[in-house]
Amino acid sequence: MINKVEICNVNTSELPVLSNEEKNELFKRIKNGDKEAREEFINGNLRLVLSVIKRFKGRGENPDDLFQIGCIGLIKAIDNFDLSQNVQFSTYAVPMIIGEIRRYLRDNNAIRVSRSIRDLAYKSLAIKDRILREQNREATLEEIAKELGVEKEDIAMSFDAIQDPVSLQEPAFNDGTEKIYIMDQVKDSKNTDELWAENITVAEAMKKLNDKEKIIISKRFFDGRTQMEVADEIGISQAQVSRLEKSAINHIKRLYK
């Protein structure tokens, strides 16, 4: 649905594309109150909104609704963008559009969160947006907590409370050749070797692996570590851990067919 040609009565295949020079010229006119330039600038950046809402595909949301909310984020970005910062408009606008859509999704989340926690989260997000806009950097929890006069743990808890639920099958990493799913990053202190014990003799299987594979299998399936934790401990990337883990499992499967 998100890839359809027409969205919100806008034919996406005919959306204009502006060059950086055209954007800069239009933006100067916008700052001087030129409404026609503003309209042209918005239309010339609708493809940016369209590219962002594709990230939210599969959530069951109406693409027209997401597109409209994304346009609000685009307009906010136009209102707050500063040419003197020497940052491309798209670099500045994308986080604003994403933030607007996420706020919409949180407000329509079926999971109920107390009003006080939501208010704290929204105040914190407003501070984050302001610091990103003014200083072009992410605010720390300590900064936000100090400004609001609360503990940083309360800020972290409020952010967690308004996060959207995600599927364990959702990719957390994708380099084009291999995917790492969220379930690969979830620690499980229970049931770490039950499936293995039912099918193979683990001790014998481990003897067939090289040293690095033994360490990874031991930490993953006996200690219940996540791939990220294993990667940090042995000094390689999570993608490498994932590949070595799968290689070791396939090796064992071949031995015990």
Image (cartoon, rainbow, N blue to C red):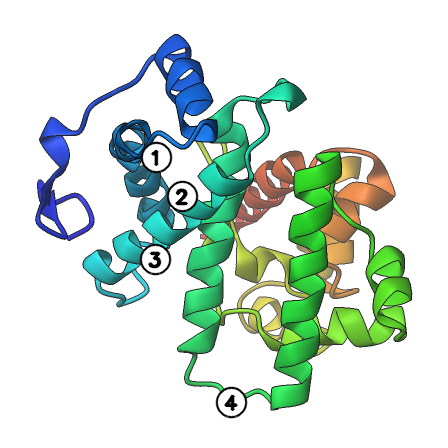
Distance between the alpha carbons at the discs numbered 4 and 1 = 31 Å
Residue 114 circle label = none
165 vs 50, left or right, is right
In contact (CB < 8 Å): disc 4 and disc 1: no
Q: Hey, what amino acid is under mark 2? A: Leu
Q: How crowded is mark 1: few (under 14 residues within 10 Å), some or many (20 or more)?
A: some
- If you read the primary sequence from the N terminus, does the residue marked by circle 4 or circle 1 appear first? 1
Q: Nearer the viewer, mark 4 or mark 2?
A: 2
- If you read the primary sequence from the N terminus, does the residue marked by circle 4 or circle 2 appear first? 2
Q: Which of marks 1 and 2 is in front?
A: 2
Where residue 212 appears, as percent x and y from the top left, is 77, 37
Q: At x 20% / y 49%, what residue is drawn?
A: 2
In contact (CB < 8 Å): disc 4 and disc 2: no
Please identify the residue farthest to the front as the structure is shown: 33
Numbered disc 3: secondary structure: helix
Residue 173 shows up from this direction = no
- If you read the primary sequence from the N terminus, does the residue marked by circle 1 or circle 3 appear first? 1
Where residue 234 appears, as percent x and y from the top left, is 84, 39
- If you read the primary sequence from the N terminus, does the residue marked by circle 3 or circle 2 appear first? 3
**Circle 1 residue:** 48
**Circle 2 residue:** 74
Residue 96 shows up from this direction = yes
Numbered disc 1: secondary structure: helix
Distance between the alpha carbons at the discs numbered 3 and 4 = 21 Å
Q: At x 74% / y 65%, what residue is drawn?
A: 224
In front here: 31 or 147? 31
Where residue 121 appears, as percent x and y from the top left, is 67, 72
**Circle 4 residue:** 112
